[in-house]
Image (cartoon, coloured by chain):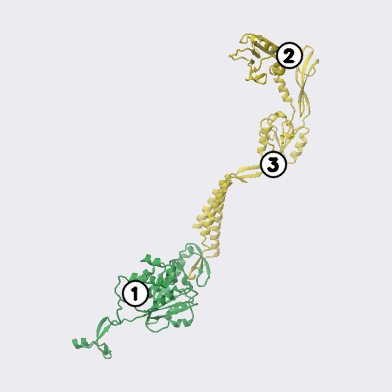
Amino acid sequence: MSLANPILLWSLLGLSVPIAIHLLSRKDGQVIRLGSIRHVQETSTQQFKGIKWNELLLLAIRCTLIFIFCLFLSGLTCTGVSKQKWVVVEAGFENDSFVKPILDSLVKEGYEQHQLAEGFPTARHDSVFGGNYWALLNQLGEKKPANAVVLSSSRFENFRGKRTPLPVNINWIAVPVNKIDFPVEAIKLDDDSLFVRTGHSSFDQTSFTAAKVKSLGANSISSPDPVRVMVISEAKYAYDRKILMACLKVIQKTFPFSLTVLESNSATPPEKSDWIIRLSDFNASEKISGSSITMRPGSSANVIDQVGSTEWVFTKRLNEEVAIDQNLTIELAHLIVPSRKQHEIARLNDRRAMPDALIRPALIQSKAANVITSSASSPLIICLVLLLLVERIIAYRRNQ
Amino acid sequence: MDARIKELLKPEILNTVNGLELIARTIVEGFMSGSNQSQSIGAGQEFSQYKNYQAGDDLRQLDWKMFARSERYYIKEADIETNITVKFILDASHSMAYVEGLSKIQYAKVMTAALAYLARKQSDTFGLFTVNDKNVSVLLPRFEQQQFIRFLNELVHLESLGRWDQREETKRLFDRQGKEMIVFISDLYDNGGDLFNFLSRLKKPHNEVIVFHLMGSKETDFDFGGSYTFEDLETGVRTKANTLLQQKEYSIRIKNWLTTTRAWMLEKQINYQLISINEPVERVLRDFLTARKKLTR
């Protein structure tokens, strides 16, 4: 039990009021000296006791009333310890060879099986986990189970947002996953060769290898995405253009995708393209489709800076030094080479897991994690009303 | 006047001789002022009537001047004004310590002092007898200047203790022949009728006994409002009682007792006065004396 405003417990001093009234008006104990008591008849002890008990009962009820009222003012909250025991399993791991024996033994011990998902359903809800571990951990903490065992893959990418301190009553067990190799892409370069990129992911790292192979094998061939780049340049930026074109050529030759480079001198692009690179002082006012890179020399450390959702700028005039020092080709390739699909594949197959030490930092542990608190206002009010009623009835009967 | 006397009725004034005298004087002067001149100018001075001489009459009483005028023998008769003896007998038992504003004993002291003052004023002799089983003090009636001071001194040092004295020898003290007025002040709480025996023995054909019966209004009505423990002042016995429950019965019992007492007194030709100690002393005395004056006329 705890109090929201313990200072209001001073109102318990109000208890002195009924006690003082009782003591002051205690007529039974008062002795009156009479000249003679020959005419006084003794009242039966039973009756006297009845009156005395009535008085004491009333005093007790009145004191209790004040006590309850004080507790109500002080904002009493009740706390209790939960006895629920949960085993929370991530979707898809119920039949895992590592998880299964643990799960079975825990269920035998009286643990309730829940799925690691929003609301922690008892029945299988999802087949694939798609939540956020930190958020779910927070929710699980709020459920205040006496003990909870979480069996999860602990995949790195599912730890998003603000970290939640892991309460002591929750055991997080990371299910070990095997190292996997997965194809990212296979692009047909020419008739007899393929560019194949393969991903390798284990609990501690994810890496990629690229190779040119002759046989198709089991890889599904994907056609390279065509990318059209329009370069608009002025005579003033002739040297910059030269450097840029060299970079684009390197990209074209190195990356397994189809890159079409177009050139124009007019301010408005004559053709539709995925990228427009302007090497001019002219600022296009009209909205253009696709992404753009414009020349706007400034003082930035990077050679290319993003200024809008689809807008980038060259912050420096382009020359060999800049191109070499700032890795201009790689920077450009990051922008131009389409890799969203590959990223998605890589993300889906990423098996890297959060180390246990990071999930459970030694210092951040909530102590009273399984303590349930609830406001006691309603029962107090009910008690107060009932006692008041009883007090009135007894007081009325006494006065009769 | 009431307020003045009330102011005087404080323990520090009541418990001194001068204070008690002051109270007595204030009370008596209060109700005497404006009344007729005292009739006690001198013994046998006031002419009453002539009576025909009969053989055996005292010749010294014969009015010779009247004989000279009418040649008849007349005996000149006058109002015989005798000084009577007033004896104050105070019940000094512990039951008189009952308090309701003033205690009964204090009330009795004030009453006695006032009546003694009046007696002195009328040249009567007065004495004081206070009785309880611990001490019987006697101040015999005398006609002296210091008598009143002695009287007051006795009153001031009077304490209510023990019970009513039951020894036979003390009763003899009050057995005296001669005309006297006995003022007996008590709460009449006796023990086996000893007080009534004493009173009946006190009453003689030639004396007058006046009993002032002191009672408190709460004591009479049992109006305490609640449950209390009651203690007998004389015996120390305690009893618990709910006054609300038995108020009616108590009142009836008290009324019966008072009625019986009054009837007994009447039968014994004792002047019985029931006094409530809640009433001011001067009013009680004035009413008593007024009624008495009317009776004597």
- The residue under label 1 is which amino acid type? Arg
Q: Amino acid at mark 2?
A: Val
- Among all residues in the image, which is located at the extreme bottom? B55
- Residue with the mark numbered 2: A250
Residue B180's spot in the image, x, y percent? Answer: 38, 81
Secondary structure state at the residue bearing disc 1:
helix
**Closer mark to the observer between disc 2 and disc 3:** 2
Q: Which residue is mark 1?
A: B292
Q: What numbered label is drawn on residue B185?
A: none
Q: Position of residue A31 (x, y in %)?
A: 51, 65
Q: Which quadrant of the figure contains the C terminus of chain B?
A: bottom left
Mark 3 element type: loop
- What is the CA distance from the residue labelled 2 to the residue labelled 3? 62 Å
C-alpha separation, residue under disc 2 versus residue under disc 1: 150 Å
Asked if both marks, 2 and 3, belong to the same chain, the answer given is yes
Chain (yellow): A
